Amino acid sequence: MAGAFSCTLIAVLVSVSRASIIDLTGTWTLLSNGRGERIPASVPGSMYTALYTNKLIPDPLYRDNDVKLRWIGREDWTYTRTFQLSSADLAASALHLVCDGLDTFSTVFINDQKVGTSENMFVQYVYDIKQAAKVGDNTIRIDFESAVTVAAQKANASAYDIPGDCPNKVQNGECHVNMIRKEQCSFSWDWGPSFPTQGIWKSIYVQAFNSAVIRELSVATTREAGGPWMLDVGVYFDVSRGSVSGVLTLNVVGTEAVKSMPLTLTPTNNSSVFSVSVPNSYKIDRWWPNGYGNQTLYTVNVTFTSNNEVSSKQRRVGFRSVYLVQNPFGNNQGLSFYFKINDIPVFFKGSNWIPADSFQENITRERLRRLLQSAAEVHINSMRVWGGGVYESEDFYELADEFGIMIWHDLMYSDHFYPTTPDFLGTVSQEITHQLRRIRHHPCIAVWSGNNEMEIGLRDQGFHDYKRYYDDYIKLYVTTIKTIVDREDPTRVYLSSSPSNGKDTEKEGWVAKDPQSELYGDIHFYNYAADLWNESAFQIPRFASEYGIQAWCDIETLEDVFDSGDFDYWGPMSSHRNHHPSGNIEMVKEVIQHFKEPTNPDAKQKFSDIIYLTQINQAVSVQAESEHYRRWQNDLTSDGRGQTMGALYWQLNDIWQAPTWASIDYKGKWKMLHYYARKFFAPVLISPFMDGNVLNIYMVVDEIPLTEVKDTKTGMNVFTPATTSLLQSSFPNHEAVHLMKKTTEATSGTLYIQMYRWDSFTPLKTWNVTLKLTQSSQSVFRQDVYSMMAESNCPDDQSCFVYIYLNNPSSDINKFFMLTPICNYFDAKGLAKAQLKIAGVTRLSETEFQLTLVADHIAPYVWLDAYRVPGRFSDNGFIMINSSRAVTFTSWDPVDLDLFTKSLSVKSLMDVYV
């Protein structure tokens, strides 16, 4: 019997087939409809990269080519190729063309027969091509229309003006991008160029099948109090004919979670939504944010078998809970606003993400890995995907899952008002539905936000016809988008905008009187006139989801796109690259609050020196603001501000070589800001600031749960918060007080505060504090700075500074702090030009090197560079308070010792003054 059964099983397996897929990515022919040229073009791709690859245009990012090549985005382009179909393909019940990304307006032809159109860059289009196709060679042609032209046509045809018409003239951009569903920043932004792409930007294929194929698989993990882990599953099919019956199966690899059920489908009844539980007997390893635990992922397999035809999809999921807490504070002082991940309140330490390139086809998985790994290496645990870019690639979300980077995810609407015609809302519905089904299985995604800055935009515009634009806003973000998000992903909260007042915004009819209130939700904060080194400049919000300041990218990065004569800070090319109005002027004004302008007579060197000073200013400014938010995570002001639980600076990455808010430039080089983020987002932070004449030093620590205990009220296993007042208020019912694992150095360490003169490596005096932390952010030292100077015989505040470290002088947990209230170096007494050298380089591995630095004087803002060797240093932008110091360098790729050694250079602050 066993032998007969085996033979029968083998016969069944052999007869099962899968849908035939004909991949259409690869080489196509690109035709300029206006000029007649035909050239080979890669798919995925756009007309810009095809023209550049074929040497018909120069590098689009070079100098002012974004303006010189404007004609490309204003013309229409056509993609064509041939492909083969077999008789079996034509005999199948269904023959569909699947286009995962058409950018943006196109008409699709098979063998010169129109099979469909597209109008939305973010929608997957599926066309029935059975009647147009034939056995043997087939031709596909996709005629694209200029998005610039179509956007203008739609604006002209609109019944009324829809604000957001044209960008500021310094951006050299195109108008009316708000009228179309395309990457909003492709028409320019204040940190990027205008390249209105056309093309096939994602995969494209023909699929032949007889029953049904799984088109989309949507999965999320959930858990009710005291219950088992659940999978919330939606399977969405493309059905070939009137009625198809089969069996749907699901299993979670490595667990006992399985489900099998019969299913009958039709073209209109083409989905299955259900839940699957993971037995309590199986211990799930949870997914944690970066710094809190492992990022364990499980594979979910879903298969549909019908008439011996099988279709399957896989998803990688992480079991974790996410909950946004918005509870009232006493006496009408607003609502809290913080995230609990796996029942633990987590301070969101992070940044904002923009598209990594104007041309999506240039973004490789390795490039994304370096950016997201760079984020994780500086303790970033969260990132906001900004609403003017694209719904990112699978590679992006998979890497965010891998690195434990939680995503605050805007939907792709930003800084413009939008139409609310039935056609527009119809394509929006397709877009949101498709994108949520595509990406909601990723554990990294924590929250959905409807748009970037449109609630505050509506409130601040002062429209004469306010009701019209308010009604449009509600139609788009509440009636349409919120309804879809609530249906497609009830496991995550939906915020209508960023910034917003969260629940209070909803209470006020979705547009709060003050969407930037410090008592609710999140804020965006920018002030280019204030001294951003001084904490008094900042607000005290619940959550800061955007803040920052500009700095230039590295001179090496500019060398790729500047001519030799362009390296003039006040020259035309420098002005052209800054798309923020008066941005170069603002940066200099910010710099001269703390430094003198560089004096080198060589133009390029002077430009390089200015870049260095703008990077110092950016790093210290964002450091001051980020630490300010972390310090306020436990406390409240008398008027109810505080308990800040998020700091996402603007922005992580660049889209081109220019001065921007990014901490990593387009070439992947870390700016000084990114090195500083490694300290201001560290699990243990020393954070001094001046409170009048008082030096106030805080210790801030991230708490990591050690084990679970059972909550007596809910019966649910939770992690017991032992120190933070915010955490204690979250869990009032514990069986026992339980330990929280903080960094050992912070719980039992000693903090040393040293007074130095600028002219000596020997400290004048050392104070020490034995740490006894009772909460995760706490003042541990307060003393009048002038009494400290008197105790240490420091003659005045221009002669001295403070250096603080934890436990031992070589600790990575340290901080250098100026004493002068305005933190300037104009009158620093005894600050000499240090003779700073790299005394030796030792190779530790193919990608790691140790450098020994020596100096004859104290040197602030020591800056190391490895010219054209991609990688990062263990520290940079630091102060040398000893005559020697070791620093490591880790390259992204293996590099020769001699080549690396020759690439090195070092400077400090006084080197910019001749």
Image: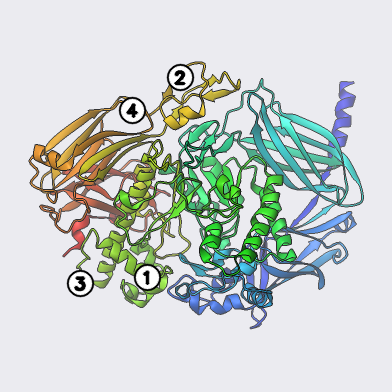
Residue type at mark 4: give it: Leu
Q: Considering depth in this image, is 60 or 412 the residue closer to the camera?
A: 412
- The image shows residue 262, relative to residue 51, as above or below, that is above
Quadrant of image for the C terminus: bottom left
Image quarter hosting the N terminus: top right
Is 747 situated above or below 25?
above
| Residue labelled with disc 1 | 582
Residue that numbered label 4 is attached to: 773
Q: What element carries label 4?
A: loop
Q: In this view, does 565 lie to the left or right of 758?
A: right
Label 1 SS: loop
Kindly report which numbered mark, 3 or 2, lies closer to the viewer in this rendering.
Answer: 2
Q: In which quarter of the image is residue 470?
A: bottom right
Q: Which residue corresponds to mark 3?
A: 601
* 303 or 225, nearer to the observer: 225
- How busy is the neighbourhood of tag 2: few (under 14 within 10 Å), some, or many (20 plus)? some
Residue ID for mark 2: 738
Whether the residues at callouts 3 and 2 have beta carbons within 8 Å, the answer is no
Real-space Cα distance between discs 3 and 1?
A: 25 Å
Query: Which residue appears farthest toward the bottom when viewing the image?
Result: 35
